Image (cartoon, rainbow, N blue to C red):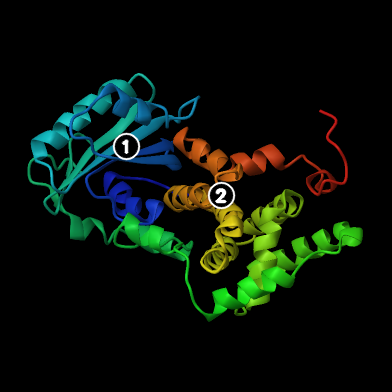
Amino acid sequence: MTIKITSSEAAVAATPYLFGFTPTDSFVLLLCDPGTMRGSLRVDLPDEPSLSWLGSIVGGVPDPAPASAILIVYADTVPLQFAEKIIDWVMEVIRPVTDILDLVIVHDGLVRSLFGEMKSAVMGVPLADVENHPIVAALVTEGLAKVANREELVARLHPLHDDVTRQVLDLLDSEEPDVTGYEQWRALLESRSVELLLSDTDLQPLDVVHIGLACCDIYARDPMLTVLLEENAKGHDRLCRARDRLVYAITHLPDDIAGPTAATLALLSWASGDGAAAMIAAERAMLADPHNTLGPLVADALQHGLPPDTWLTLTRDIPMNVLRGQLRRTA
């Protein structure tokens, strides 16, 4: 998905959809290469700017850095003067790395652009007007949405204790692969899970079990991810559907399987350009399964500002039979 940021208004309107929620008391950095979004970063505002806080921002800028950046401060409960202080501090560490297109403060229902295209430092533009920017319709069409706050996104992955979960647990006790035919069972698990994640039919408890087990086996998971990411090129809505179905599975699986499933969701969310959802899923994966390696990998990639196409770029030339563990890599 390509997101064009053509003005400060577009940047502020797009930000809640890029992160999945409207930031509050936050600093946001949008990274662009002539007009096209290349990455984004959000951190909570500190009590006072510090070197470690500034380091977390600089560490999120990829090397080489995109051509330009837009800095936005959401000052909900802090004074306007503090927001301006934050802008000054961040500008000093970002300016040597990339050009700054605009400095924007969202405060008291107004959007103030300090030197960008809106030129609204004195009076400000009503946030309600900015939220109706045409870019919002384009992002919604691409499947992006927002909730009121980050906590709502976190809550989407909380475990549910209902009849479906009880049926899933019963099925997990009985769904043991035939060791003598494990390769065939794994291949069936991979293909079945891809089919289930791209389907629009209701998931049944056994479907949840198959998706979870596929995410636990890297030789089923990695080729499954490759197929799903290739499907994304055919239409972003297909990957959005797969992500929604992974959310459903995570909420009905025990932690030891929900963890790897959440890590899979984290990678697909990252690849979709949804960094906030990716980080939340990665955190859920690490909390549920401390031994999982994919969750920390995605979290680290997000913290260092790696672009969403990184995984596909790294795995594009790896043959599927290698991803399926059928051949050893020679280099």
- Taking 22 as reference, is 211 left or right? right
Which label sits on residue 70?
A: 1
Which residue is disc 2 drawn over? 289
Quadrant where the C terminus is found in the figure: top right
Q: Considering only vertical position in the picture, is 244 above or below 320?
A: below
- For the question of whether residue 146 can be seen, the reply is no
Q: Nearer the viewer, residue 178 or 80?
A: 178
| Type of amino acid under label 2 | Asp
Image coordinates for residue 139, horizontal then vertical, percent: 42, 59
Left of 188 or right of it: where is 287? Answer: left
Q: Residue at x 31, y 45 (%)?
A: 7
Q: Amino acid at mark 1?
A: Ile
Q: How far across and how far down the image is residue 164, in percent? A: 56, 78
Q: Residues within 10 Å of mark 1 (few under 14, many from 20)?
A: many
Q: Quadrant of residue 88?
A: top left
Judging depth in this view, the residue of 245 and 136 nearest the camera is: 245
